[in-house]
Image (cartoon, rainbow, N blue to C red):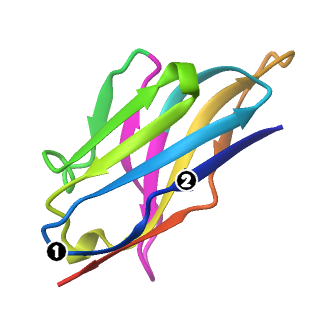
């Protein structure tokens, strides 16, 4: 099986910074795209940013220039550096990864349990 575990969430004042981590573990053969999603209360889950296995990135307009996604393929870990945080960034942040398990031909998407980020004004 595969597990994704997020860490690094918390409470921060507007204008502050946080760094989230997402560690993947289990019988992993390879990981393709890795993503950060977020879901604010009463809203749909939205894609925040994506990073490919080759390091190409894409960002939602709302976070571009403030958030930076990165990954360490040797550690099967992804990071999200969040700066200039705003109250509207408050949400549960989820990591998501496209994983091929050892001995399995097809890829599957896995989710972490989520980590709360709260930005106070």
Residue 66 in the image: x percent, y percent?
16, 50
Badge 1 element:
loop
Describe residue 111's horizontal placement relative to residue 78 as left or right: right
Residue at mark 1 to residue at mark 2: CA–CA distance: 22 Å
Badge 2 element:
strand
Q: Which badge, 1 or 2, comes first in the chain's sequence? A: 2
Judge by depth and name the residue closer to the eye, 85 or 64: 85
Q: Residues within 10 Å of mark 1 (few under 14, many from 20)?
A: some
Residue 79 in the image: x percent, y percent?
41, 41
* In the rendered image, the vertical position of residue 16 relative to residue 59, given as above or below: below
Location of the N terminus (image quadrant) = top right
* In the rendered image, the vertical position of residue 19 relative to residue 89, given as above or below: above
**How many marks can you see?**
2
Q: Is residue 7 magenta?
A: no
The residue wearing badge 1 is 14
Describe residue 97's horizontal placement relative to residue 116 as left or right: right
* In the rendered image, the vertical position of residue 104 relative to residue 99, given as above or below: above
Describe residue 17's horizontal placement relative to residue 8 as left or right: left
Judge by depth and name the residue closer to the eye, 8 or 118: 8
Quarter residue 57 falls in: top left
User: Residue 6: which disc?
Assistant: 2
Q: Is residue 46 magenta?
A: yes
User: Residue 88: which disc?
Assistant: none
Which residues are drawn in magenta? 35-53
Q: Residue at x 28, y 68 (%)?
A: 89
């Amino acid at each position: 099986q595969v597990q994704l575990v997020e860490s690094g969430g918390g409470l921060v004042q507007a204008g502050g910074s946080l760094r989230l981590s997402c560690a993947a573990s289990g019988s992993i053969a390879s990981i393709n795209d890795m993503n950060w999603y977020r879901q604010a209360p009463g809203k749909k889950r939205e894609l925040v940013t994506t990073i490919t296995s080759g390091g190409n990135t894409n960002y939602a307009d709302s976070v571009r220039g403030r958030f930076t996604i990165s990954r360490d393929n040797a550690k099967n870990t992804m990071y999200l550096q969040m700066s200039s945080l705003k109250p509207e960034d408050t949400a549960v942040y989820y990591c998501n990864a496209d994983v091929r398990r050892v001995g399995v031909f097809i890829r599957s998407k896995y989710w972490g349990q989520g980590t709360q980020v709260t930005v106070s004004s």
